[in-house]
Image: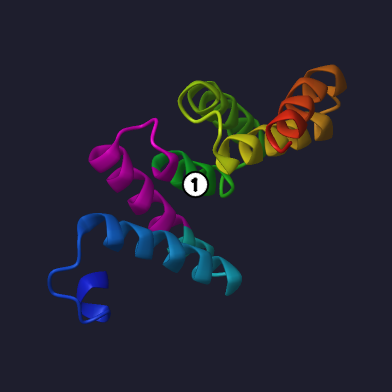
Amino acid sequence: ALQKAWGAEEAAEEEVLDGALKLGEAYGEMKDWENCRMCYWRAKQGFVCLLGEDSAKAIDAAYHVTTQILEPDAIVELKRLWEIAKVSLPNETITYTVAHDLGSYLNDEDKHEESKKYFFAALEGRR
């Protein structure tokens, strides 16, 4: 569907998935959460299949999916993403975005000591 919408009959699958992620962001800006989640989920699934679970694009798409779920489940998923990203993507911005947001969620849950670990990791990565 994205290929036809862009008039690109021969668009590469990765470009289509990039478009799905961008489309999800646009739906999010319009507060159309159902379509937002659907686009993020499709991008995540596609990037995992195409590039592997530990690729920067798969982690980024999974992060976007996580932003659409409720807090207790989001914490579990962010911890999982952090464990993958800190090993596979130590120099990528998304790694430290995950750490920062995980720290924020934990802080909101009054888990201050645990949250500090992730905030410090985010600060270290942004140097």
**Number of other residues with Cα within 10 Å of mark 1, as a class: few under 14, some 14 to 19, many 20 or more:** many
Q: Which residue occupies the foreground of this view, 13 or 68?
A: 13
Instruction: Say which quadrant the N terminus sits in.
Output: bottom left
Residue 17 higher or lower than 80, as above or below: below
Q: Position of residue 125 (x, y in %)?
A: 68, 32
Q: Residue at horizontal 54%, vertical 42%? A: 66
Q: Give residue 37's position: percent from left, percent from top.
A: 46, 56
Q: Quadrant of residue 86?
A: top right
The residue drawn where x is 59% and y is 71% is: 29
Quarter holding the C terminus is top right
Left or right of 52? Residue 111 is right
Q: Is residue 48 magenta?
A: yes
**Residue 94 appears in which quarter of the rendering?**
top right
Left-right relation of 80 to 39: right
Q: Which residues are magenta?
A: 37-57
Prevailing SS of the magenta stretch: helix
The front one of 108 and 120 is 120
